[in-house]
């Protein structure tokens, strides 16, 4: 009789545990992780869910897939991903095949690839990298067994150390950091035949601005990049600038996006939402990136007031 009672008790406990799992609240629900859309003043994106706003926390480079159902971002230089399912958004999971100290993660439109800037990983030391190698554009691909190990894309991205973004047609926009006359110029590599055979110069007249990390609109109609604030020394605060693509494929003179977006801190890593309604970017207190030193958060802002009507 006692054994029977014990079996009943354990069966009830088992059912209780199962019920807890079934009744557990999802991580988040709804478009954009259920967040209330911002206005023309930037707001921290998903505080307490994606962004931990305390000192020493660091989230950056938030980016949605074309259907809005996958979100990728960096946290303390690791890559995380969350996906929208029938039960809500999954808890962000670190992509373990991508090593430590990456920069600028970005999803492909179909969410089956993650691109990022990084160096060759040292497999004998988990999540480490080889500091003697040059930072380059790399890609991990989704497989039936999870995410693949990173592969360097090679030419024409061999000199893309100053950032990049991906358009809806898989074209990649980047800036060259090579020496000589091509340094600090914007480029686009069209996606042709499942690859990127060449890069084409983008004629943006930046003047004295140092363009970095171009964030291209999904339809390639405009681009946002960051530059060191005018008259400020190198390595100091940065601002975001907007340039529009004209019908004849020329680009407007970049303009500062103004004091509501550009603060006294560092703004960089612009990404445009799939519907072009919002811009995601990173605002940080510095470049040290060390735990307990600087803090960085992903912000989002409605673009309606910053774009001409025909570009919205």
Image (spheres, helix red, strand yellow):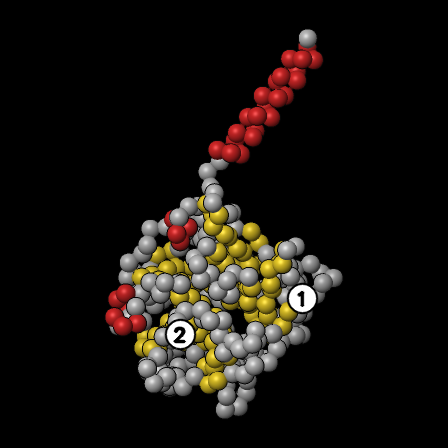
Quarter occupied by residue 179: bottom right
The N terminus is located in which quarter?
top right
Residue closer to the observer: 120 or 286: 120
Residue 199 marker = none
* Residue located at (44% from left, 45% from top): 28
* Residue located at (28% from left, 65% from top): 304
Crowdedness of circle 1 by 10 Å Cα count: few (<14), some, many (20+)? many
The tally of labels here is 2
Tell me whether circle 1 and circle 2 mark residues in contact (CB < 8 Å): no
Quarter occupied by residue 216: bottom left
The image position of residue 242, as x and y in percent, is 35, 74
Residue most toward the bottom?
A: 181
Q: Tell which circle, 1 or 2, labels the residue nearer the N-terminal end.
A: 1
143 to 86, vertically: above or below: below
Residue 300 falls left or right of residue 19: left
* Residue located at (45% from left, 48% from top): 49
The image position of residue 120, as x and y in percent, is 66, 69
Residue closer to the observer: 257 or 8: 8
Quick one: SS at disc 1? loop
Q: Which residue is mark 1?
A: 121
Q: Which residue is mark 2?
A: 220
């Amino acid at each position: 009789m006692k054994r029977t009672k014990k079996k009943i008790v354990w069966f009830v406990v088992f059912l209780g545990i199962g019920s807890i799992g079934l009744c557990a609240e999802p991580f988040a629900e709804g478009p954009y992780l259920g967040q209330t859309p911002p206005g023309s003043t930037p707001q921290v994106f998903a505080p307490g869910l994606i962004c931990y706003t305390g000192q020493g926390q660091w989230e950056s480079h938030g980016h949605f897939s074309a259907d809005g159902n996958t979100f990728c971002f960096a946290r303390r230089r690791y890559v995380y991903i969350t996906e929208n399912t029938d039960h809500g958004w999954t808890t962000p999971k670190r992509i373990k095949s991508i090593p430590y100290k990456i920069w600028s993660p970005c999803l492909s439109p179909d969410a089956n690839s993650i691109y990022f800037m990084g160096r060759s990983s040292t497999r004998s030391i988990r999540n480490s990298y080889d500091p003697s190698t040059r930072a380059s554009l790399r890609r991990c691909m989704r497989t039936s067994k999870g995410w693949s190990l990173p592969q360097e894309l090679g030419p024409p991205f061999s000199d893309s150390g100053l950032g990049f973004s991906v358009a809806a047609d898989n074209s990649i926009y980047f800036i060259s950091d090579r020496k000589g006359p091509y340094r600090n110029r914007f480029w686009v590599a069209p996606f042709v035949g499942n690859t990127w055979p060449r890069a084409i110069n983008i004629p943006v007249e930046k003047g004295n601005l140092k363009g970095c990390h171009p964030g291209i609109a999904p339809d390639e109609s405009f681009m946002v990049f960051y530059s060191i604030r005018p008259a400020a020394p190198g390595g100091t605060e940065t601002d975001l600038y907007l340039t529009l693509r004209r019908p004849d494929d020329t680009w407007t003179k970049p303009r500062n996006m103004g004091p509501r977006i550009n603060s006294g801190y560092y703004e960089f890593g612009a990404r445009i939402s799939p519907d072009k309604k919002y811009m995601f970017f990173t605002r940080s207190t510095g470049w040290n990136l060390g735990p307990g030193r600087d803090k960085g958060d992903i912000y989002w802002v409605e673009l309606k007031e910053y774009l001409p009507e025909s570009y919205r």
